């Protein structure tokens, strides 16, 4: 496994490349940006997401790495934009299964749950 630096952007990109193949982090970053997506890259959180092509009100999270409070903060920030009603992501990332299950959540409910979990984790 790659050396952990403590910077979510560096560690998240390295882990993604390690699991999925060299250069995948850059490919996914470009995909998210070309789809009108969101990339949150800060020392405590690294997220790549884009609106699902079939439903612009659903934000599909392609990749997320960071601590719980950082993820909760990023969820609050993107929800505050008012662009998304639902949030979805793959379950079992990197499991090797051909078809990985996609989970869809009400964005406000998911965000509130993450914030409660982050407060408990402190």
Image (cartoon, helix red, strand yellow):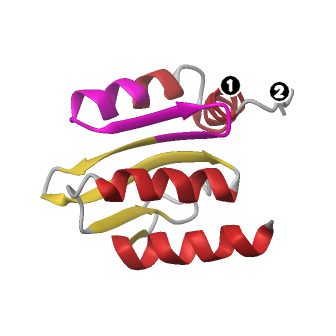
Q: Which residue is mark 2?
A: 5
Closer to the N terminus: mark 1 or mark 2?
2
* Within-10-Å neighbours for mark 2: few <14, some 14–19, many 20+: few
Q: Quadrant of the C terminus?
A: bottom right
**Residue at 13 percent of width and 57 percent of height:** 54
Q: Position of residue 98 (x, y in %)?
A: 47, 57
Residue interval drawn in magenta = 29-47
Q: Which residue is mark 1?
A: 10
In this image, 62 relative to 34: left or right? right
- The vertical placement of 98 against 108, above or below, is above
Query: Which quarter of the rendering shows the N terminus?
Result: top right
Q: Is residue 27 left or right of residue 20?
A: left
Q: Name above or below for residue 113 compared with residue 60.
A: below
Query: Residue shown at 84%/31% (left/top)?
Result: 4
Residue 52's disc number: none
Q: Position of residue 95 (x, y in %)?
A: 62, 57
- 53 or 95, which is in the foreground? 53
For residue 10, which quarter of the picture? Answer: top right
Residue 15's x, y, as percent?
69, 35
Question: Is residue 29 placed above or below 117 in the rendered structure?
Answer: above
Q: Is residue 56 left or right of residue 117?
A: left
The residue at 46%/57% (across/down) is 75
Q: Residue at x 41, y 51 (%)?
A: 77
Q: Position of residue 74 (x, y in %)?
A: 49, 50
């Amino acid at each position: 496994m790659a050396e952990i630096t403590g910077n979510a952007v560096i560690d998240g990109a390295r882990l993604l490349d390690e699991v999925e193949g060299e250069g995948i982090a850059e490919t996914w970053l470009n995909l998210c940006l070309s789809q009108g997506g969101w990339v949150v890259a800060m020392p405590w959180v690294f997220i790549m997401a884009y609106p699902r092509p079939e439903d612009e009100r659903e934000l599909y999270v392609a990749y997320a790495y960071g601590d719980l409070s950082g993820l909760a903060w990023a969820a609050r920030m993107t929800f505050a934009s008012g662009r998304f009603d639902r949030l979805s992501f793959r379950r079992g990332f990197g499991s090797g299964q051909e078809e990985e299950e996609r989970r869809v959540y009400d964005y406000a409910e998911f965000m509130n749950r993450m914030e409660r979990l982050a407060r408990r984790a402190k």
